[in-house]
Amino acid sequence: MCGIVGISSNNSNAGLSIYNALTVLQHRGQDAAGMAVMNEEGFLSMHKENGLVRDAFNEEQMIRLQGTAGLGHVRYPTAGTINISEAQPFYVNSPHGIVLVHNGNLVNTSKLRSELLNDDFRHINTTSDSEVLINIFASSLEKNSSGKLDDEAIVKSVHEVHERVEGAYSVIIIILGYGLVAFRDPHGIRPLIYGSKDDKNHIIASESVALDCLGYETSRDIKPGETIIFKKDGLISNYTYTNNKKFSPCIFEYVYLARPDSTIEGVNVYESRLSMGRFLAKKIRNELTKEELDSIDVIIPIPATSRTSALPISIELGKDLKEGFIKNRYIGRTFIMPGQKIRKKSVRQKLNTINIEFKDKNVLLVDDSIVRGNTSEQIIKMAREAGAKKVFFASASPPIRYPNVYGIDMPYVEELVAHGRTIDEIAQKIGADKLIYQDLEDLISAVKENNKDLDNFDCSCFNGEYITGGVDDKYLENLHNSR
């Protein structure tokens, strides 16, 4: 999942702008944060640390991280370990000096590692797929530049990355002394957007909210396979990539990952979640009996992502919408925390009940999704302990029955509560009196309702259809073992 940002400017405050952008993208990763900044002389300063952005950088480090161009990254562990060596940015000094940040996950990493060692003669120091990616690009650039670095060599190298690499990757690169390079995989699975303040100041980020909060005007989303080069003089060049792969942005960005004030592929995330709520309300009407519907006293969202979807459900069903859970804002998002034990421990630290909203009531709880089921189970238990008579549970997304291999931590099917279970069995497992899931067709319609030009999505965690090559039972088993 991760959050990435790149800035090219005409002043030396790029480091501070990157810091501020990373705090806005903190929801995309809480495991580690890193930054690399290049000054006008082409010298590079880099720092990365485990933990939140505010803890990873102190005043002394920020004074050192001054320059006119730079990259930033907040890490959420997917492939690899949670060791600081896995944190980004990654740097290689040959050729030219290259720094990279990457959001996504590669699925043919093992094959690429072997090729890099035996064919490209490049050494890999960590288990991170991002280090593999930077070396694939560097190897191609070394071959294509032949001592002369220009746009043609860079674009040709990116296209070779597209030919060799399978998986999801939104990438920002600094080539020392040249400028910033940004590109997405040919399917456009993970988001990447750019904007400008004037002819000299440009930003690339995972979400538009980073642009908004820093006062940049959004230009557009970077297209699948496209390469955009931001020169030191402020000029921007863009190059398309011709292929027959379907543009398939990840639909889970709209369900959970992205901030509601972001716009991705022309779809406002907040509006898409309102639409999800309207579609889910219709499903609830069809699934519950009249007696069950009439018995519901209150609708309570699980903070904070599901609040938006819960609002239209309340309106459509004519039921009161109340806050029944208070979230400790200083506890991170449990879904993206490293390690299952930490996730389980964090739920009760994260939420507390307002007992008066549950006592002697039948409640309908609304959440954005159910992944492993541990959080849902504990929340339902908390509702009953607070006095709820019946607990109905609605999910704004369909059952997650398959692992997501493109940058979301769903590594093995056995961890997913919906895998191999019927809806009634899932309800029994998490302790709900009744469980209602969004239909996949309705979820797709909810997002497309806000941009009808979107034809296809990566829905692999819902339907098991992986849009890239390289994903089979052997790959999934190896992925599980690597964790």
Image (cartoon, rainbow, N blue to C red):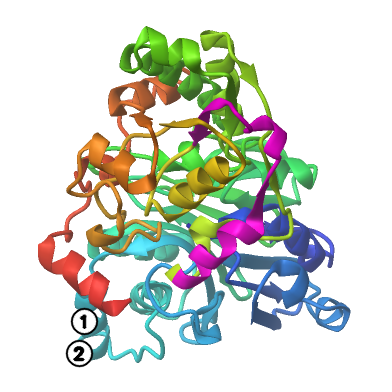
> Going 58% across and 16% down the picture, which residue do you hit?
314
Along the viewing direction, whichever of 395 and 39 lies nearer the viewer: 395
Q: Is residue 39 above or below residue 384?
A: below
> Going 33% across and 34% down the picture, which residue do you hit?
398
> Going 19% across and 65% down the picture, which residue do you hit?
476
345 to the left or right of 115: right
Q: Is residue 470 above or below residue 429?
A: below
Pinpoint residue 354: horizontal percent, then vertical percent.
Answer: 71, 40
* Residue 261 visible here: yes
Pinpoint residue 390: horizontal percent, then vertical percent.
Answer: 47, 30
Residue carrying label 1: 115
* Mark 1 residue type: Glu
Structural distance between the alpha carbons of marks 1 and 2: 5 Å
Residue 298 position by quadrant? top right
Q: The residue tagged with tag 1: helix, strand or loop?
A: helix
Decide whether residue 365 is among the magenta residues.
Answer: yes
Magenta residue span: 341-367
Along the viewing direction, whichever of 273 and 181 lies nearer the viewer: 273
> Mark 1 Cα within 10 Å, few/some/many (few <14, many 20+)?
some
Residue carrying label 2: 118
105 to the left or right of 11: left
Pinpoint residue 78: horizontal percent, then vertical percent.
Answer: 41, 67
* Mark 2 residue type: Asn
Pinpoint residue 299: horizontal percent, then vertical percent.
Answer: 57, 24
* Discs 1, 2 touching: Cβ within 8 Å: yes
Q: Residue furthest left?
A: 473
If the image is split into quadrants, where does the C terminus sit?
bottom left
